[in-house]
Image (cartoon, rainbow, N blue to C red):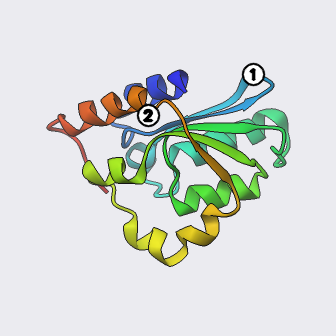
Amino acid sequence: MRIAVQDARRGFRRGDGGPFGAVVVIDGRIVGRGWNRVLVTRDPTAHAEIVAIRRASRRLGRYDLSDAVLYATCEPCPMCLAAIHWARIRTCYFGCTTRDAARIGFDDKMIYESCGRLVRSWVTSVPFLREECLPLFEEWRGRSDRVVY
């Protein structure tokens, strides 16, 4: 999780996207790292979790990551939960909550209400190190150059 926080902070400080990071881990080894790259790539699907999954799959040469767990600095949105499901990752540890994200301008409430409950049932989501992820959001919120999308 701490690597995900570092990557997220580095990414948003250079303008890649929002304050989100993720790592895919197999047997204690990071096989994919990602941070939000929505702004730099102009790709609305370039969320940290999806970037990390893509990198892990490319590195390992397979889409089936059923032996992996994912650590994310924030509770994944429904799109990312669906990607986690399709990668067959069964457990996701997350730092900040969707409420924390909404407080800094990333409010996915409408999406969660329409499809989030179903998607959430596919993956076990476990709160983890929230207190270490919150300062990331606070720093991002304090930036004058932040872009909320």
Sequence-first tag of 2 and 1: 1
* Residue 40, horizontal then vertical, whole percent: 40, 43
| The C terminus sits in image quarter | bottom left
**Residue plotted at (45% across, 22% down):** 6
Residue 19 - label: none
Q: Is residue 145 left or right of residue 52?
A: left
Dot 1 amino acid type: Gly
Between 23 and 28, which is closer to the camera in this rendering?
A: 28
| Residue occupied by mark 2 | 130
Q: Is residue 53 left or right of residue 46?
A: right
Q: Is residue 106 left or right of residue 71?
A: left
Between 116 and 61, which is closer to the camera in this rendering?
A: 116
Crowd tier of the residue under label 2, counting other residues whose Cα lies within 10 Å: few below 14, some 14–19, many 20 or above: some
Residue 28 - label: 1
| Residue 104 visible in the snapshot | yes
Quarter of the rendering containing residue 3: top right
Q: Secondary structure at mark 2?
A: helix
Q: Is residue 53 left or right of residue 77?
A: right
Q: Secondary structure at mark 1?
A: loop
- Residue farthest to the left? 144
Between 123 and 144, which is closer to the camera in this rendering?
A: 123
* Residue 97, horizontal then vertical, whole percent: 42, 47
| Residue 14 visible in the snapshot | no
Crowd tier of the residue under label 1, counting other residues whose Cα lies within 10 Å: few below 14, some 14–19, many 20 or above: few
